[in-house]
Image: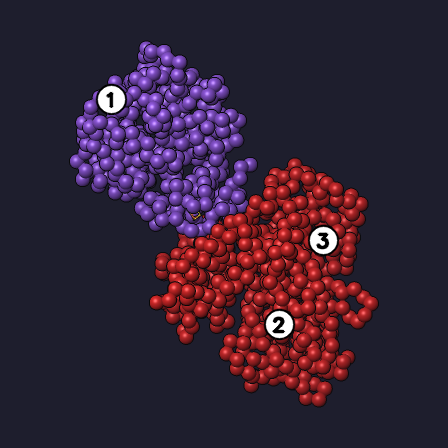
Chain colours: A purple, B red
Amino acid sequence: MKGYLYDSDRCMACTSCTVVCPVAAATREFLGPKMVGPALSRFRRPALAPDLAADLCSNCKNCDISCPSGVPISTLNMLSKAEYYRHHRHRLRDWVLSHGQLMGNLATPFVPLSNLAIANPISRTMLGAFGFAGRMPLPAYVRKTFRKQFRALRQQSFPQKVVFFPGCYIDFYDPGVGLDFVAVMQANEYEVVVPRGLGCCGTPMVANGFPGAAERAVRRNVRALQEWTDAGVPVVACCTSCSLTLKQEQQELFDVPGAAELAARVYDATEFLLELRDRGKLKTDLKQLSGRYLYHAPCHLRDQGIGRPGFEMLGSLPGLEISDADAGCCGLSGSYGFKGDRYEVAQAVGDALFKKVRASGADAVISECGTCRHQITVATGAKTLHPISVMRRAFE
Amino acid sequence: MDSVTVVVIGGGATGTGILRDLSMRGVKTLLIERGDLASDASGRFHGLLHSGARYAVTDPRSAKECIEENAILRRIGKHCVEKTEGFFVRLEGDGEDYEGQWVAGCAAARIHAKRVDLKEARRLEPHLSRRAVSVFRVPDSAIDGFRLCWQNVASARRYGGEVRTYTEATGIERAGDRVVGVTVCDTLTGAVDSIGCDHVVNAAGSWVGRVASWAGIEVDVKPDRGVLIAFNHRFTNRVINRLRPPANGDIFVPHGPITVLGTTSSPVASADDNVPHVEEVLELLHNGTELFEDLPKYRILRAYAGARPLYSPGEGRAASRDFTILDHSTDGLRGLTSAAGGKLTSYRLMAEKTADVVCRELGVKAACRTAAEPMVEDPPRRLVTRARPFFPPYGLDLAASRLGAAFGPVVQGLQMHPEERRLICECEMVTLAEVESAAREPTTFNLGDIRRRTRMGMGTCQGAFCSLRAVGALVSHDLVADKDGKALIRDFLETRWKGIRPVLWGDQIREAEFQREVYAATLNLDGTAQR
Ligand code: SF4
Ligand code: SF4
């Protein structure tokens, strides 16, 4: 058993976490991280029936960021949710939202039919009946997954290797980001490896109360990456939730052998590039760019405690004008904002960001997280980009 | 001057038990207590309702008495007893012979002690030491001393019994060889008074000797000090006892969200000496770590000390934890009875025996009924269902059992005024409505009284948030007329400090510093910052 007992013991009830929790600010129905996490954990042991107080928690992890005591509050929340679902049935919707990889594998061969099936008004009504938010379109599947396109790619071979962890979002919805990463690395004399057997990082399963499936995902990824981590090759993700899970969340939740060794090699893509730049390992004759961008830092990037490397990198590219929105959580939190009964909360949470985006007049909004970008585009109509896509233009 | 038939001195378990017993027999009785109820030994112990197994080898008579009373209290005290059951755990290196004697002792006392498979024991109590070699389950339970006393009073009140807290007895009035009253002093205002009566019951616990001395009678009760530690979490769901000859620091008792570890035993000159020392805490931790290896990692909330009253009649016999009822007519004074010694588990029996003596002298024929009738009624099911949405998870059952008869009106308030559902104390989940309800009681004078009724301030933050909130609520609802809000907070935090100071390390020192920042640095409660 992990040290959850002492973890929640460290809470000194300072309430910082509740002050920063975007969900608690959006709805009084949510008791807030202090109560739902460490405070209720004191009562859960004697209780016979698990509670669902954490159900409104979006696992955005702003509470963890603010906690001066290092309490893994969001993880306590996810555990209590999991405990509840050990005794109660899940909603089908939550299963669908948390098994993106499986759904993607099923849907991709039938694109564009499968997208049409999701997006047409009739099935959207039906989806609504299953608990999806009618007003929140699901992202569209691509015809060719990232991995398929990657396999067709002809890379130049270099002695320096880097492993790329695509994750579900890039694989099924946004392969361009992965291809941009490969291009940037190639321009800097790195060869990109995508080992067979990688899948979902597990975080959507955690957030929807499927810890068993999440643990299996972690085990599979650790196994698939083992030979590379053993060889000391860095593992990089462009999705901040994937990199956070690989670095931290899976370790808070599970005891998977090899997971700690893997975690030590994991980088977020922008973090990795910034480090290369600082060590003088990146190409310096960059193309002149132009454009005015607004940057949104995903919560799961901020929780990594590495600053805003993407923002920093872009700020140093010639000709770019970029400012930080600094407007908190976008509200979507992976799968949360797609749920009918969470949609209002998710929109309320993102409101400050949406206002900033609309007022900015920027050419595009830059953010590392795919679901943040989706939320921003749907809510504001703004064009969005991953920082790596902008970097590609400078490096190629 | 008021006049009643019997005055009981001492508002612990024994005194309130006697008040209940006499009231149920139709005797007009008033209890006086110098502080709040259960503010001494009855609120300063491990909160263990013994099954008797702990005495199975050393004191078979107590063992038998305990198991009988245990069964009664689990029946009549449903709202102050948590039926946790208990484990007796023998560790590697603990004598096997003792285990044999203990099993035989339990059988002789008719205590149901059943061996538990080690794997099952670990499943039930995953934090228990890996060095456990035998585990037995017994009907130990957890009992809340504060609630026990108040529920005795609630029951007594239904039969006309009365109680006056913050009223200290200062002398016994006599006419010839008869007691005719007691002189009292209001400890809050200093006003003196006297109360006329036919009989005085001396149930002053460790102070029994002092009270008897006012009548020129010597009763040799010696206080024996016990120190306990309260931990922030419930890391065991059962009472855990070490299966070896009773020693210091080998009992763990879960209470709601916390766990209590006890206890030490050392004679003290005065029972008022109840500040724990660091060395005592360290000794408990050292011993307790054998049963729970991770103990040093668990957060301590506070430490506290209480004094057991040990009665030693004359020379040559060891002081015992048994009780003795002293009818002082044998000393030439009629109308005075002392209840000396005893332990909480058998308080009801002790009260019964005392009331028997008093009734015999008063010529009252009614028999004791305290074992038959529950102290407080269960709240109606419909009310509980209606109340569920007004409480956070787990909060409802806690509130229902601590509120007793006040539960109905509190639920009413929560329904009509949703803002009353806000939590004043988040750590122990006490709503504004409950705090106000406790504050409205005529026996409530300060935040400590509210704390003992509701558990406000007893959790993780030890009053950092609730004291300010509670005083704010009380002042704005005019519930503390003529009282200085600042002084209320200061007194409350000061008593919390007493328990925190001996455990000021680890997470608790961070908590204390946080509290200091809030009250001293931000609110200038200590007045350091001058204009
Ligand atoms: S993870 Fe996000 S939503 Fe959940 S409690 Fe923490 S801050 Fe609130
Ligand atoms: S921020 Fe951390 S220490 Fe403060 S209340 Fe929340 S969990 Fe507790």
| Label 2 CB less than 8 angstroms from ligand 2 | no
Label 3 near label 1: C-beta < 8 Å? no
Identify the residue shown where x is 24% and y is 22%: A286
The residue lying at 69 percent from left, 54 percent from top is B248
SS at circle 3: loop
Mark 2 vs mark 3: in front? 3
Q: Which mark is residue A286?
A: 1
Q: B72 or A167, which is in the foreground?
A: A167
Neighbours of disc 2 within 10 Å: few (<14), some (14-19), many (20+): many
Contact, mark 2 vs mark 3 (Cβ under 8 Å): no
**Residue B63: x percent and y percent?**
74, 57
Pick the quarter of the image with the N terminus of chain A: top right
Mark 2: amino acid = Gly
Q: Is residue A312 visible?
A: yes
Whole-number angstrom distance, CA of label 2 to CA of label 3: 29 Å
Question: Mark 3, chain letter?
Answer: B
Report x, y in % for residue A302: 35, 37
- For the residue with label 1, is its CB less than 8 Å from the closest atom of ligand 1? no
User: Which residue is found at the position 36% from the left and 45% from the top?
Assistant: A21
Seen in the picture, residue B242 relative to B403 is either above or below; the reply is above
Residue for point 46% across, 21% down: A232
What separation in Å lies between label 1 and label 3 (alpha carbons)?
Answer: 76 Å
